[in-house]
Amino acid sequence: MIYLNNAATSFPKPESVIQAVTDYNRGLPFHAMRSGFSAQTKDIVSDVREKLRHLLNAERPDQIILTSGATHSLNLIIRGVLEKNDHVVTTWTEHNSVLRLLKTLEKKEFIHLSLVECDKKGLVRPERISSALRDDTKAVIVNHCSNVTGAVQDLKKIGTLISAQDAFFIVDGSQSAGHMDIDIKEAKVDAFAFTGHKGLFGMQGTGGIYIGDRITPEPLMIGGTGVKSDYLYQPPGKPSYYEAGTPNMPGIISLDAGVSFVLQEGVQAVQNKKKFLKDIVLEAFLDHPQILVYGGETKEDFDSRSAIISFNIRGFSPSDTGYILEHAFEIICRSGLHCAPLIHQALGSYPEGSVRVSFSQFNSQKDAEALISAVFKIAKGRKFQ
Ligand SMILES: Cc1ncc(COP(=O)(O)O)c(C=O)c1O
């Protein structure tokens, strides 16, 4: 079996992640601030915050809030910051974790929404974002790296252009954290949501959000934090203000081990390896008359992108191609709209979507070649087994 669905969730996880979770589950459960074993746990929780701070170039570890994933993080920040009649600017490249929430708030007549288009490469012109700003704009929400095309938006330029206004800059970094160098300070980002189970190699149900000091959202959930238990309100102060309830300790342990793995390997080295695999596939696909690759025409168009390729074989629906790849060739990828419906309108792949392959550093050249061979066979309409 060849797994090429790392943009959904990374597989396999590094051995160190599996070991850390196994060790945790075998031992006495410890729990930051709430048990006799807090010293050790506190260190792990502080450790992971510090590693994530380093990865994102945030100022302080307490600005890193741990959540159950990017969807949780985005709900926390969006619901926590928006007030009635606020105006919000977002883009066609967003995932449904942003789009559905904003469209729902718009339908309830709670917010006013402006959606900025991307081009057929999946890129949003920063100037278009800044010209969508109004006096009442509270937030600009941008997906850093597309989970459909791997296209990366220019955060620094967007951050600089919008900084003249008061709007908060909120970024969905689900597909960029662990995959590429990130500097939230340089890009003037106010909140950066990320997931733990993709490029950071944690377990599913992990993630977090950086919340800068310019922004104080209301908490999404209120409850026990293990501190100031005599106080009948949510004790203020990051990070515990936003972390009510028993934390997902096995998940946090996995995230700690996953982020350590990423830092040890080096984000740049990993990116280079994945680019090598992506280039092998692109070279084959872009030249093939029956294969449509979305988001670019030349290999160079994809140079600065994440290792995600969306394509279709002419004459086959994406779901048929995905099914054949999985059942005849044991290659797992994903087909459809990938929870990001609007970008497909710009790419020309709406409404059926595309077949998406996404690499991790655990994939090999052989995997890339097996994919090419399988796709070429399907395109030729050969017998599959
Ligand atoms: C761009 C993007 N945003 C948000 C999410 C949601 O992430 P999570 O699974 O951590 O909620 C995903 C995951 O598919 C994604 O690709």
Image: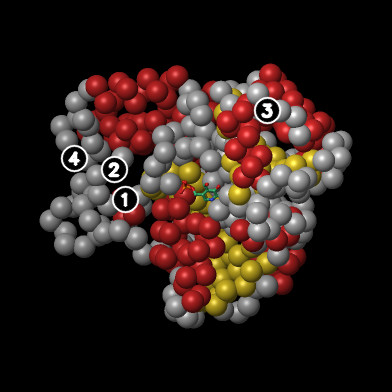
Disc 3 target residue: 384
Which class describes the residues within 10 Å of circle 2: few (<14), some (14-19), or many (20+)? Answer: some
Quarter holding residue 26: top left
Q: Which of the two discs, 1 and 4, labels the residue nearer the N terminus? A: 4
Q: Answer whether residue 84 is visible to the viewer in this image.
A: yes
Task: State which mark lies toward you, 2 or 4.
Answer: 2
Q: Amino acid at mark 4?
A: Arg
- Asked if 45 appears above or below 159 in the picture, the reply is above
Question: In the drawing, does residue 34 fall left or right of residue 264?
Answer: left
Question: In the drawing, does residue 348 fall left or right of residue 29?
Answer: right
Disc 2 target residue: 247
| Residue at image point 65% right, 23% down | 385
**Nearest the camera: 265 or 68?**
68
Task: State which mark lies toward you, 4 or 3.
Answer: 3
| Residue at image point 47% right, 70% down | 104
Disc 1 target residue: 243
Q: Which mark is residue 211?
A: none
Count of number-bearing discs? 4
Q: Residue 119's x, y, as percent?
A: 77, 59
Q: Which of the two discs, 3 and 1, labels the residue nearer the N terminus? A: 1
Disc 4 target residue: 34
**Nearest the camera: 351 or 248?**
351
